[in-house]
Amino acid sequence: MKLKQILSLFTVLFFVFTYSCKKNKILTSSVYNISTSTDNLLFDTIFTTIGSTTKRFKCYNKNSGTINISTISLLNGENSQFRINVDGESGVLFNDIAILPGDSLFIFVEVTIDPNGSQLPLIVEDEIVFETNGNSKKIILNAWGQDAYFHVNEIVQGIWRNDKPHVIYGLAAVGYPSLDSNLTLTIEEGTKVHGHSNGVLYVYKSSLIVNGNLNNPVIFQQDRMEDYLLYPADSIAGQWRGIYFSSALNSNISHAEIKNAIIGIQVDTFTINNTISLNKVKVNNSLYSNILTQGSNVNATNCLFGNSDNYSAIISIGGKVNFDHCTFSNYFNGFRSTPSFLFKDYYKTINEQLIYRPFDVANFTNCIFDGNASTDFNCDTLGYDLTGIKTNVLFDYCSIKTEDTVTSSIFSNCFFNLKTHFNNTNNWNFELTGASEVIDLGKSSLISDDILDRLRSIPNDLGCYEYM
């Protein structure tokens, strides 16, 4: 009997020992990795003096064996504004951290920043990098680096003052489906608006009023102001999303510059009698298009739609659009297969079905369509082909660069393949020079000045600049 008890105890101990060894087996295959309770940490406390705050997250091992994290490190090392604490120890680099199966690890993150320190960017970033079994996992860290107004996924309205920059992190929405609409956001002259990566100023069934002037324009741009290692900050397109109007109410943007977005201005489907008015607006260096309209009402005067990685402008699928004394010119310093200007009154479904969306009115008067491609003008209309009725599109007294043979009745008194000789397209300067062949070719117009508020002489020059 005693021998049986000893054997039973031995058997129990054997299985406990075997299970314990199996449970604590270190998993080294790349199929095993750690999990974290978040992929990013945002420190959104606004400090008025030197401030400090701490946040934490968990690192999990959800596997059946022990995982050894080779390194946990701050990407910027000792130069980081952040500090981390792992398992009770502070530092910027940690090696060989083991987590048992089903267990977790707290990691504390602290940041100390003087938001009035002008040497810092608007948003300070870093990354915590985990290296485990050949896998790399990152936690993005963001904190306010300067004193500014920060708009983080919020509904905005009222007045944006010009005393401090405004930073859009995620979504700044003037109205939003199922939440609010019929709001108004007014932006004062001289205001600087900065979009973080993919940040968007979204206007839904509401109004945006931008009150810039010649000496104090409103600037919309990215939040990274310091240069990259090899490139100036202003040379990189697509650093934020841009301004997006969706079924918006009457809105007006005057004397503004919009740059380095994915789409500078996007205007989608309008209700009757609501229009976006653009007056003396410059849009440059967008990743996709400086302006994109889809079934919308837009009235633009003395506007520049300049360099872009793809299109200076896409005007498409219906609405009422009027562009007077505008320059569409793309001298992007790199390869592009797209024209500067694209105009379409149809689209294709996923089944290749053509959907015709005619414009109520589409007028382009005293405009320039130019660029450094062989053809920088693509007008693709199906109105007559599909309906037998003349389409409501007119290009009147415009300078157009194209290799295509143009015979359509939508062109009136237009000029083809003239030499524009802009001042300095590499620096986004599209002012005319004495060698420009578009001087004095304009149609008489009610537009009495140019984008720089200079009086126009008669006959007018084409485009948004009057040569002086």
Image: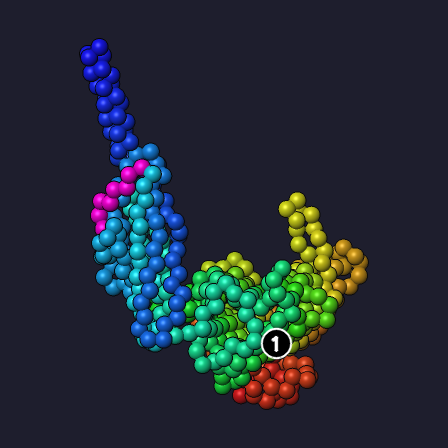
Can residue 95 be found in the magenta stretch? yes
Q: Nearer the viewer, residue 221 or 384?
A: 221
**For the point 66% across and 49% down, which residue is it?**
349
> Which of the 4 quarters of the picture holds residue 381?
bottom right
**For the point 45% across and 70% down, which residue is it?**
150
**For the point 53% across and 88% down, which residue is it?**
468
Identity of the amino acid at label 1?
Asn
Can residue 230 be found in the magenta stretch? no
Q: Does the image show residue 420? A: no
The picture places residue 296, in percent across and down from the top left corner, at 67, 65
Q: Nearer the viewer, residue 251 or 103?
A: 103
**Viewport quadrant of the N terminus:** top left
Q: Nearer the viewer, residue 6 or 203?
A: 6
- At mark 1, the secondary structure is strand
The picture places residue 63, in percent across and down from the top left corner, at 34, 36
137 above or below 445?
Answer: above
Magenta residues, start to end: 94-101
Q: Outermost residue toward the top?
A: 1
The picture places residue 392, in percent across and down from the top left corner, at 74, 66
Q: Does the image show residue 386? A: yes
**Dot 1: within a 10 Å radius of its alpha carbon, few (fewer than 14), some, or many (20 or more) residues?**
some
Q: Is residue 382 left or right of residue 101?
A: right
Q: Is residue 89 left or right of residue 142?
A: left
The prevailing secondary structure element of the residues shown in magenta is strand
**For the point 54% across and 70% down, which residue is it?**
156
Residue occupied by mark 1 = 252
66 above or below 465?
Answer: above
The picture places residue 426, in percent across and down from the top left corner, at 44, 72
> Which of the 4 quarters of the picture holds residue 375?
bottom right
